């Protein structure tokens, strides 16, 4: 889905892109959920070194958290990008959401 962002104060203008997919796999949901955000099998690392810079617990399950992740990729133009990841699991659903953020913007947020 794409949409144009409106001129709201504090929001950049441009196009907003949203994508979602689902699929059935013959594996326990908890196993898949544990695989997606694992540093050793991190899908978005593109072969780079993954470093979790911040980890904020968000519930009783250890998988329920918000993480700020840096992926160091040699010779990459995206070395100034971080990945903001939220993951959550309960009896009815589980999700892992990723968003790319640039370091400058994240520093502004972290410094108030």
Image (cartoon, grey):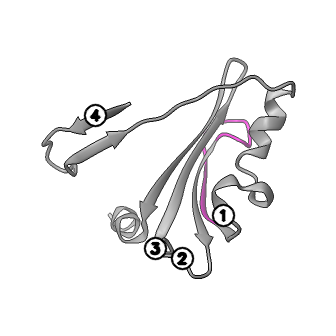
Q: Quadrant of the C terminus?
A: bottom left
* Residue 21: percent from left, percent from top: 58, 29
Q: In the shown orientation, is residue 12 left or right of residue 105?
A: left
Q: Residue furthest bottom?
A: 75
Q: Secondary structure at mark 3?
A: loop
> Looking at the image, which residue is at 22% across and 52% down?
12
Q: Does residue 41 lie above or below 93 as drawn?
A: below
Residue at 68% from the left image edge and 71% from the top image edge: 48
Instruction: Let me know if residue 55 is in the magenta part.
Output: yes
Q: Which residue is mark 4?
A: 3
Coordinates of residue 101 in the picture (x, y in percent)? 43, 59
Q: Is residue 1 left or right of residue 30?
A: left
The disc, 1 or 3, on the residue closer to the chain's N-terminal end is 1
Q: Looking at the image, is mark 2 or mark 1 earlier in the sequence?
A: 1
Identified at 79% across, 36% down, the residue is 32
Relative side of 1 to 92, left or right: left
List the residue tagged with mark 1: 46
> How far, Cα to Cα, is label 4 from label 3?
26 Å
Question: What number of labels is visible?
Answer: 4
Mark nearest the camera among 3 and 2 is 2
Marks 2/1: CA–CA distance: 10 Å
Magenta extent? 52-64
Are the residues at dot 2 and dot 1 in contact (C-beta closer than 8 Å)?
yes
Q: Which mark is residue 80?
A: 3
Q: Residue furthest right?
A: 27
Q: Is residue 19 above or below residue 42?
A: above
- Cβ–Cβ under 8 Å for marks 3 and 2: no
Q: Give the mark, 4 or 1, whose residue is nearer the N terminus.
A: 4
The percent coordinates of residue 75 (x first, y second) are 57, 82
| Residue on which disc 2 sits | 76
């Amino acid at each position: 889905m794409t949409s144009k962002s409106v001129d709201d104060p504090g929001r950049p203008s441009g196009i907003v892109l949203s994508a979602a997919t689902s699929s059935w796999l013959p594996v326990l949901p908890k196993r898949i959920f544990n695989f997606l955000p694992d540093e050793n099998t991190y899908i978005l690392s593109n072969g780079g070194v993954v470093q979790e810079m911040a980890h904020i617990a968000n519930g009783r399950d250890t998988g329920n958290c918000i993480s700020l992740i840096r992926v160091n990729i040699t010779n990459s133009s995206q070395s100034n990008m971080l990945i903001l990841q939220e993951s959550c699991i309960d009896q009815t659903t589980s999700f892992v959401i990723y968003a790319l953020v640039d370091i400058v913007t994240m520093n502004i947020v972290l410094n108030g």
